[in-house]
Structures are given as structure tokens and as C-alpha cells.
Image: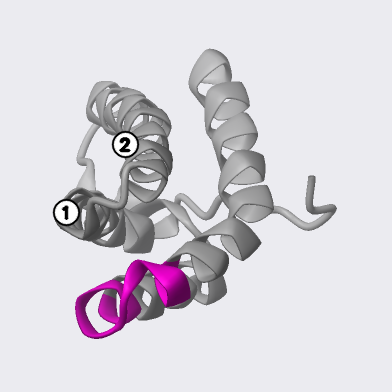
Amino acid sequence: MPTNSLLDLTRAKEFAFEADQLRELVMTFEQSLSQEMGIIRAGLANADPLKVSHSLHVLKGFMPLFATPTLAQAMTELYQTSRDMPLEVTGPVFTALVPSLEGLLVEVRSCHSAL
């Protein structure tokens, strides 16, 4: 797991007006991140580029609210790669991001339980 924090709630806090809204946003992101990562893995295993691209699009939308700018940008680039390149290219890029995404998920779960 990465040693630097990948979670950045600055934009989520700007979006949520109350603590309850922030909790709900974090919970929704936690569920989505976990679910979409599984769908991407299955899509790669089953050679389903549409499923992979759709899930990357979902995560790309969430990342600016919850992730550091560097990770959010990497997800945006990965989504674009999934639209322009075959799974043989997208798969390894996703695999390289998995440790960061899993680290982010751990941080989100920790944050959610602390809210």
C-alpha cells in the first residue's frame, strides 16, 4: 500500500454542506470504488471493453472529489486510454494503478468509520 495519503476530501467537503452529506458521499464512494474495481477486473478477465470503460468512467467521475489530484488525473488518463486503446493496453495500466486504488479504498473505509 502506498505510504502517502491518496484520500483528499477537500472537494468533497466543498460539495457537501453538512457532515451527514459528507458521510453519505464517502459511503457511496466506498461502495462504488469497491464494486467498480471488481467489475473492471471481471471485464478484463472476460475481454469486455465496454464493461471496463463504463466502470472506469464511473470512477473517473468520483476521483476529483475524493482522491489526490495526481490519482484523479491518472484515472482520467486511464479512462481515455480505455476509449482509445484495446484491453491489452488498458489492462496493464489499470493493474499498475491497483495498489493506489486499493490503498485509497483502505483510507476511505478508515475515514468512513471515523466520520
In the rendered structure, which disc, 1 or 2, sits on the residue that comes first in sequence? 2
Q: Quadrant of residue 105?
A: top right
* 82 drawn magenta: yes
Going by the image, does 35 lie left or right of 115? left
- Amino acid type, label 2: Ile
Residue 78 is situated, as x and y percent measured from the top left of the image, at 39, 73
Q: Quadrant of residue 34?
A: top left
Residue 25 is situated, as x and y percent measured from the top left of the image, at 27, 33
| Closer to us: 66 or 37 | 37
**Magenta part mainly helix, strand or loop?**
helix
Q: Which residues are magenta?
A: 80-90
Quadrant showing the N terminus: top right
* Colour logic: one colour
Dot 1 alpha-carbon crowd within 10 angstroms: few under 14, some 14 to 19, many 20 or more: some
- The label number, if any, that marks residue 54 in the structure image: 1
Q: Quadrant of residue 72?
A: bottom left
CB within 8 Å, label 1 to label 2: yes
> Helix, strand, or loop for circle 2?
helix
Look at mark 2 in the image and give the residue it sits on: 39
| Closer to us: 42 or 98 | 42
Query: For the point 79% across and 53% down, which residue is it?
Result: 2
Q: CA distance from mark 1 to mark 2?
A: 9 Å
Query: For the point 34% across and 25% down, which residue is it?
Result: 31
Furthest-bottom residue in this view: 84
Residue 98 is situated, as x and y percent measured from the top left of the image, at 60, 51
Furthest-top residue in this view: 113
> Is any atom of residue 12 visible in this view?
yes
